[in-house]
Image (cartoon, helix red, strand yellow):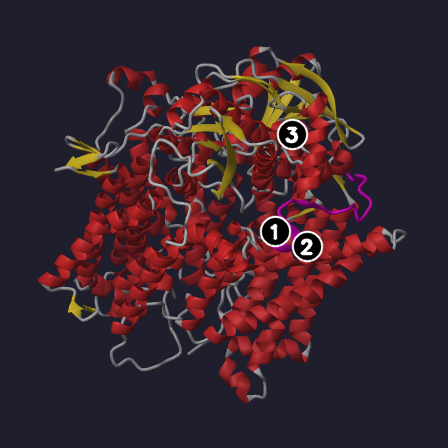
Amino acid sequence: MKFAGIRLGSPLGIALLALALIFLPTVAGLLGAAWVRALAFAALYVMLALGLNIVVGFAGLLDLGFIAFYAVGAYTFALLASPHLTDNFPALAHAFPGGLHVPIWAAIPLGAGLAAGFGVLLGAPVLKLRGDYLAIVTLGFGEIIRIFLNNLNFPANLTNGPQGIALIDPVRLGPLNLAHPLDVFGWVIPQVQLYYYLFALLAVLSAIACLRLQDSRIGRAWMAIREDETAAKAMGVHVRNVKLLAFALGATFGGISGCLFAAFQGFVSPESFSLMESIIVLSMIVLGGLGHVPGVILGAILLSLFPEFLRHAAGPLQDRIFGRAVIDVEVLRMLLYGLALLAVMLLRPRGLWPAPQHGATVTPARGVAR
Amino acid sequence: MNSPSRAALALSLAILALAGCDRSKEGAGGSAGSGNVIRIGHVAPLSGGTAHLGKDNENGARLAVEEINAAGGVKVGDKAYQLELLAEDDKGDPREATLAAQKLVDSGVVAVVGHLNSGCSIPASQIYNAAGIVQVSPSSTAVKYTHQGYKSTFRIVANDGQQGGAMGNYAVDGLKAKTVAIIDDQTQYGQGLAAEVENRVKARGLTVVDREYTNDKASDFNAILTKVRGAHPDVIVYGGMDATAGPLTRQARQLGIKSDILTGDGACSPEYIHLAAEAAEGTICTQAGEAVSKLARGDQFVARYKARFGTDVQIYSPYSYDAVYVIADAIHNAGSLDRAAIAAQVAKTDYNGLTGHIVFDENGDLKAGAVSVFQVHKGQLEYLSTSR
Amino acid sequence: MGTFDTFLQQVFNGLVLGSLYALIALGYTMVYGIVNLINFAHGDVLMVGALTAYTAISAAQAHWPALPGWGLLLVGMGAAIPTCVLVSLVIERVAYRPLRNAPRLAPLITAIGVSILLQTLAMIIWGRNHLTYPQLLPPDPISVGPAIVTWTKIAVVVLSALIMGGLLLLVQRTSLGRAMRATAENPRVAALMGVNPDRVIASTFAIGAALAAVAGVMTAAVYSVAHFYMGFIPGLKAFTAAVLGGIGNIPGAMVGGIVLGLIEALGAGYIDQLSGGIFGSNYQDVFAFIVLCAVLILRPSGLLGERVADRS
């Protein structure tokens, strides 16, 4: 894959990409720390998008409740690394007199595993459903998880209900505490930037994992069932296991991002995991190019940064052009966001950066999610 | 493959370039006096389901800023500064709240009025606390908000504990109820308030005959109200906002329910009376502060608000109005534009505002937060009593 | 108020709710049957109908104060239906028609974009506040046996039944209906038989929009409130109902809507008795979704089976 004439896979390409990622927040930081925070969230959304891409893009299973796995990951870390459980369960307070402070590198596998378990739980009953039936059931699943999280404060206060869980530990990696700025030979890196580096690193690893998966046997199996399930079965693909694996792996990505999100924000509540969030992640991958890893990454970055760009620029732009705010800034943000979705899909229906169609015949779209 | 990659590159550069359009940037620093302007931030949901309340908050703050500026600004030492209000939208979403908070910190505000929802105030408080900026919330009632151990969090409303307790007391003393049914909308505010009411009425010996739940986007309450009707409570307590409380009250009366209906400050607004129409007659609601209409400046405020913005006061604009005055007062008394000094001064506030006498306790809650009780009579909120 | 009386009341509550869901689900299912598209913006068309009717009713009240309640209702519908039809036709032409041969998820995203646009435009035009509907029909509770109802609720059930009957007649007995069924079955062959698929599709959208408009006005009349965000949840519920009944299937949408309404009302009323007090009405949506999943697992094409285009 070439980018501005340089092969991305070559050592030079990798070095340049790495440098760009490392110094991007410094450049963005000149515009304000809010931009670095936005970049950190963008990296989180990249991971989410890559996870959903496995389910919808690779395997062709339309999932409208993906954010449930994000929620599972977030609450796992929240419960393991905050005062909530020790405050509400005296037995635990006795067992852990210093409080529950499970480190992130131990919580992430737990969160990912739990999310994967829920992925299989969702996948198992829906194997025979296709298309919009699958969509509505996955949507229902997402809502069910959110409602449970919102209500598990009775009879035992597990999730603290709508109040959410606050005072979650930040990320601590050995001696490194991401809640404090880091001094590297005189160059002070603020906390937000440290989180960005962690998320960007994990996003890159996720992208590499997805690219490997794409070209692996399991990736081919996914694409086979996406294109024609019956033919795939006839060719010996174990459809049931392959589908379950898609759900489980996608959920794993979601779970990992969820843990990181909880540590970053320090507070989780069910309102962060609404249906709209699932839809936004779906929009990201369709907008970017469904099934194509670079496109999905592009879609995630653009769609998560666009509202921030509008937040910063919409007001001053209006001032410059009209001298005053003709439309309220928040209204303009929504208008432009909706228009952007519309415009991009009308102009490039296969996404901004779709998978290359080598020698494909142009047939009416059979599309995904049958 | 070059075309999309070039397009992506161009798009990203354009985003970065246009983002530089934002001129309101200052490096993070301890003070923000650029020229003669002091910046104050305000955050609330300006889009989505509670947009009408968020805009109301912003209007209240803006009215205060304009009044202060018209009267000569804030005097710091022997220099007079004009106030500038930087208003942000957090959409009621915790993640957006942190982004808005960070943007305000970058813009060099000395204090923030916000947020509206406790679920946004709490994650944002982490950012304000790290930057040393004082945060005065006009409407976040979750007890947790001021109990995180930060020295920067304050609120001008009574919290859920204070208000829920007062509501429970009124059910017993004012309404003479023996049985009560409690409904909440399963949001941070509604559930928190309802839980406190439940604690208080149980402590005072009432029987909770039914406990029902809905959500903040619902419009049909017939099913749960039918169930409540079967339990024959003396009082129905609802924890939730006016957008759901109004239709709920109306549907209750349409089902033939005769019980008293008691709601909290989220439903104690003209909007509630519009939405419930005749069904609102006789219902009781509480507000988490002094009765605005009882204070001399209250009616003037309502009139000035209407003249400036063309809409009615919703719920919390008197509180965001007071919050700005509290901050301006603190800046004046601190005699400096340093964020830490202003924050320390806010803690020592002793100010008579629209919503009452404002003094903070060691957590940042109102000391002796007053809760006033109203009854809807002939389409208006009629003041009944205040508990302190 | 005995337990049977409560049960009867809950059944009636479910019928009212279900009738509204059915009206909206019909629009969803008709469009899906013909173009295989989940019209995410359908709920917002409903919202546009309710708000347009609000403006018309307010104007009518100002100019003709003597107009009776049901007259105002007719005025409201008269304003809402053409507006919604127009909006829907524009949306179909601009956002969906160009993507007929595009990957299946593309029109889903444009639908989401349209939904956001409609909500924002509504926020600009009608403001952020919740608007109160005047009482159009007498609000006094009436006793129908042991249940207590109002004229508006009765009107909803009766009107929905009439409309559904009318729609079935349209689809089964008229030439437009025949053309619609033909296009839904196989658009290319239908074209060969002299049917203009573009026109038929546009007509389908128009009829769906008219149904949404009626549903919007009735929803606002029953709950007496309208605001720019009111379409999201009804749209979602209607989609659920359409799938429950069998997507693309018109009688299926009606059955799905009524069944969903009944499940929700009875669920909210009886969950905690059924679960021994562990789960209360806070789980009513969970209950509804679980029933939906159970139905789909047992009958993967919905209660009455699906009818979608054969696109090969």
- Measured along the vertical axis of the image, is residue C172 above or below residue C40? below
- Measured along the vertical axis of the image, is residue C52 above or below residue B375? below
- To the question of a shared chain for discs 1 and 3, the answer is no
Which residue is identified by label 3? B228
Residue occupying the far left of the picture = A11
Which residue is identified by label 2? C51
Residue C229 x %, y %: 58, 50
- Measured along the vertical axis of the image, is residue A221 above or below residue A20? below
- To the question of a shared chain for discs 2 and 3, the answer is no
> In the shown orientation, is residue C243 left or right of residue C86?
left
Residue B196 x %, y %: 53, 20
Q: Marks 2 and 1: in contact by CB < 8 Å?
A: yes
Q: Residue at x 62, y 47 (%)?
A: C128
Residue B331 x %, y %: 47, 25
Q: Is residue C133 magenta?
A: yes
In front here: B336 or C218? B336
Q: Quadrant of residue A292?
A: bottom left
Q: Quadrant of residue A79?
A: top left
Q: Main secondary structure of the magenta part?
A: loop
Residue C154 bears which disc, if any?
none
Which amino acid type is marked by label 3? Val
Q: Residue at x 81, y 48 (%)?
A: C137
Q: Earlier in the sequence, mark 1 or mark 2?
A: 2
Q: Magenta segment, which residues?
A: C124-145
Q: Residue at x 60, y 63 (%)?
A: C27
Residue C228 bears which disc, if any?
1
Which amino acid type is marked by label 2? Leu
Which amino acid type is marked by label 1? Phe
Q: Quadrant of residue C265?
A: top right
Residue B87 visible to an observer of this rendering: yes
